[in-house]
Amino acid sequence: MSTPQPPMPQQAAAAPNWQAAPGTSYTSPIPVTRTHLGHALSSEWTKIKSVRSTMWTLGIFLLLVIGIGFLVAAQTQDSDFSDVPYTVPAFFGLILGQICLITLGVLVVSSEYGTGMIRTTFTASPQRHRVLAAKLIIFFAVAYVVSAFAIGLVGLVTAGLHDSSSPVSWGGSVIKGALYVSLLGVLSLAVGSMLRHSAGAITTMLGVVLVPAILPEFLLLTDSMRSIGEKMLDYNAPSSLATIFQLDGESGGGGAQLGLLVGVTAAAIAGAFLLLERRDV
């Protein structure tokens, strides 16, 4: 004998109808804000300051520039700065330290491609050009501030170690030296965006920095290639920094070297933006 079924409960009250009435517009209770470059800048600043690679590379950069600079400054005398600025000891640290900024510039963009997080980034910000622009701005600002601080600190300590004041102004070497190594990092970021591979982009940038510094020694051996070797000798990264720090005996130098680097960096950035919009992730 079957047991009687309990009476069915009464139907719950109908759920409220959120559909807007005809002739009216629906207004979401969630505030909607139009996105702009400031949001992308805030996002990229959060990224660059929260990853360990930034702290490691910038820490090693400061250790090289300031540490080597202090060691060199301790071995100098007043007469050594009769025709060069007090920031010259920082030059020797920048020769190695620039590799840190090159590496960091590549990792800022290529690490997201390696982990696949770039898809999340572009989903949150479909305007890809805005993301790349924010990366370039934030990285350049961080690299320039850190570089100028390191060079300026070495200059201040070196000036404090010597009683006589150098007749050579060293403020320009701080500005130009920091600008040069920061632009190398920005160039690396653009190359990393185009290649999308950390090892490949870092290797490419090391070739850009090292090959022009080594190859001229062989090109100068032949008369037909001598002119090319002399140009490469004048415009490679170590020689450019030496000119900026007036080690070549010319005051206020480095403008031509900076101009060339600005042009190359601008071309690489244009290529990075062009490929970013044409390729899938």
Image (cartoon, helix red, strand yellow):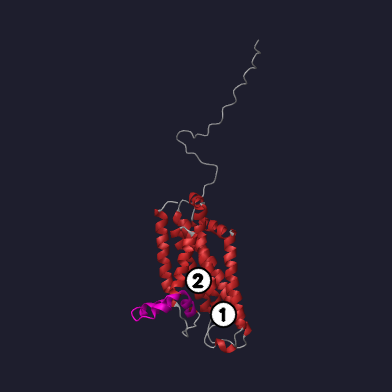
> To which residue does mark 1 refer?
89
Q: Pick the residue in front: 242 or 211.
A: 211
Q: Please, what is the three-letter code of the amino acid marked with disc 2?
A: Val
Residue type, mark 1 in image: Pro
* Image x and y of residue 187, in percent: 46, 66
Q: Position of residue 133 (x, y in %)?
A: 47, 60
Is there a contact, CB below 8 Å, between mark 1 and mark 2? Answer: no
The residue that mark 2 highlights is 181
Q: Residue at x 39, y 58 (%)?
A: 274
Assess disc 2: are there few (<14), some (14-19) or many (≥20) residues with their C-alpha within 10 Å of its C-alpha.
many
Task: Point out residue 159 in the picture as x, y percentages from the top left corner.
Answer: 60, 83
Q: Is residue 44 visible?
A: yes
Residue at 56% over, 57% down: 47
Left or right position of 214 against 65: left
User: Which quadrant, please, contains the N terminus?
Assistant: top right
Determine which of the numbered discs, if any, sits on residue 67 in the image: none
What secondary structure is the stretch in magenta mostly built from?
Answer: helix
- Disc 1 from disc 2: Cα separation: 16 Å
- Write down the region rendered in magenta: 214-243
Identify whether 232 is placed above or below 141: below
